[in-house]
Amino acid sequence: RKRVLAAPAAADWREGLKWEGRMEEMMAGQPRAKCWFILNKFKIAHMQGSLSTGSPHHVLSLIRLEERNVDLLGKMERFRDQGEEMCSLADRLFTAGKRQESVWWLERARKVAEAHGFFSVECQACLGLGRGAMNEGRDAE
């Protein structure tokens, strides 16, 4: 566990991902903040893997980790971060061609942001919804 948490992400993304199969074990019994930290270490490694290799495997893994992160941030009551993570997830899904899922996450992000008073996140979600509508040819809405 210490090697994963201490790895300078840019140079050692491959080393960090060797431990991903033990992520649940690493997070077991840890406080939520530590779990968030562990999830983010693997997210960073997959982002760097995606940039280095162009492999869709890394994108799919990022989507899975971001979904878990959204849930964890909600439990930690970090609603601004949760909304931003939802928007990031939606953007990744949109890029992967999963437009309906992307819209679902953006609508959810907008509702969370509105409920907790995070106007900037609400705007970010609405911008994503507008971009999606325009890409589908619905620019008159």
Image (tube, rainbow, N blue to C red):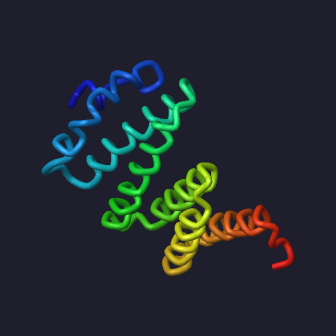
In the rendered picture of this protein, how many numbered marks are placed on residues?
A: 0
Q: Is residue 129 left or right of residue 64?
A: right
Question: Which sits in the foreground, 85 or 33?
Answer: 85
Look at the picture and state if 56 lies above or below 32.
above
Residue 100 lies in quadrant: bottom right
Please, is residue 18 above or below residue 114 in the view? above
Residue drawn at (43%, 32%) of the image: 45
* Image coordinates for residue 28, horizontal then vertical, percent: 15, 48
Vertical order, 10 against 107 (above or below): above
Residue at the spot x=80%, y=72% of the render? 138
In the picture, the quarter occupied by the N terminus is: top left
* Image quadrant assignment for residue 24: top left
Q: Nearer the viewer, residue 31 or 61?
A: 61
Q: Seen in the image, is 88 located left or right of residue 1?
A: right
Image height of 137 relative to 5, above or below: below
Residue 56 horizontal/vertical position (percent): 52, 37
Query: Of residues 31 and 136, which is closer to you in this image?
Result: 136
Measured as percent of width and height from the top left, residue 109 is found at 53, 69
Residue at the far right in the pictured view: 140
